[in-house]
Amino acid sequence: MFTTTKKLLQLAEETNSAIAAFNCYNAETAQAAIQAGERANKGVIIAYGERYKDYMNLEAFAAFTKSLAEQASIPVALHLDHSYEISTIERAIASGFSSVMYDGSALSLEANVKTTKHVVEMAHAAGVFVEAEIGSMAKGDFSDEEEGDGRLTDPDEAISFVKETNVDFLAASIGTVHGMYKGEPKLDHQLLKTIAESIQIPLVLHGGSGTPEDQVLKAINLGIRKINVNTEVSLAAVTEIANQLNEQPQIHLSNLMTSAQDVMAEQMYQIIELYKNK
């Protein structure tokens, strides 16, 4: 069934778990995410990034995903990930996205507050929830995200930001990266604890790919309720496609993409099971 991001994160809070938000941008990624969620019997978030709008039409993707969600046996939400343009957010709201993320992390705190507040007012009027970010994540290997400066979230800034904007979820920068790590991952769990104790809204962890399981579980126990995953699923699919083409250079495209989807679904299933925090 199609649901809201807020309902999924409330469920995560009740069960001390986290919801996987998989970056999806075509039929195979969306179908794999829902397939994995059904196998694990846990809701999932389909996260469509603004950077994919020239590759996959936003309105068409929303209609496709909502149709899949209505047929699914688990709750499925549709989230706009890392959007910098108000026009994209407006399109997502009009298309029925469950939630949107305005990313003003590269702006001054004042500018971030001003624009995020505008997005919140616009989205809430349509019953859509809003995620924002304080801090700035660095870019690791194999990522297609924007480059950040790696600045960790300042707890005092986060408190004032949430109060002034009335945002629904907050992405906190605590040491993860977009993509795969170039060095040893080390999350600042004490910082996360401080933020979680100061803010009464769900916290989001970007950069789930390649983060050690013990550090992920510790973050969940400290209050992370949504974790974004992209690169490791992409790498699994690309590796499978390369292997299939090496073995069968003339393989039919439908069979090739089915194989990639199956591999992604397996990878996603393992991630969802981890985030159950059992």
Image (cartoon, grey):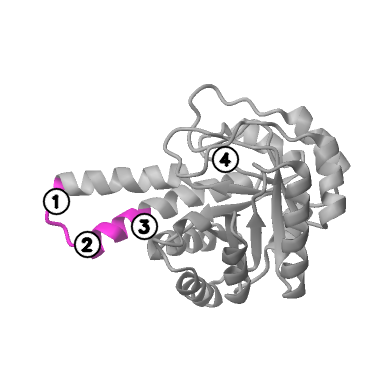
Closer to the N terminus: mark 4 or mark 1?
Answer: 4
| Residue 79 rendering spot, x and y as whole percentages | 60, 62
Residue under label 2: 253
207 vs 64: above or below: above
Closer to the N terminus: mark 2 or mark 4?
Answer: 4
Residue under label 4: 207
* Type of the residue with mark 2: Leu
210 vs 264: above or below: above
Residue under label 1: 248
**Residue 261: which disc?**
3
Range of the magenta residues? 247-262
Q: Is residue 91 left or right of residue 36?
A: right
* Type of the residue with mark 4: Gly
Q: Is residue 238 left or right of residue 169?
A: left
Q: Residue at x 71, y 28 (%)?
A: 188
Marks 2 and 1, Cα distance to the nearest angstrom? Answer: 11 Å
Residue 222 sits inside the magenta stretch: no
Q: Is residue 219 visible?
A: yes
Q: Nearer the viewer, mark 2 or mark 1?
A: 2
* Type of the residue with mark 3: Gln
Q: Are marks 4 and 1 in contact (CB under 8 Å)?
A: no
127 vs 238: above or below: below
Q: Are marks 3 and 1 in contact (CB under 8 Å)?
A: no
Helix, strand or loop for disc 3: helix
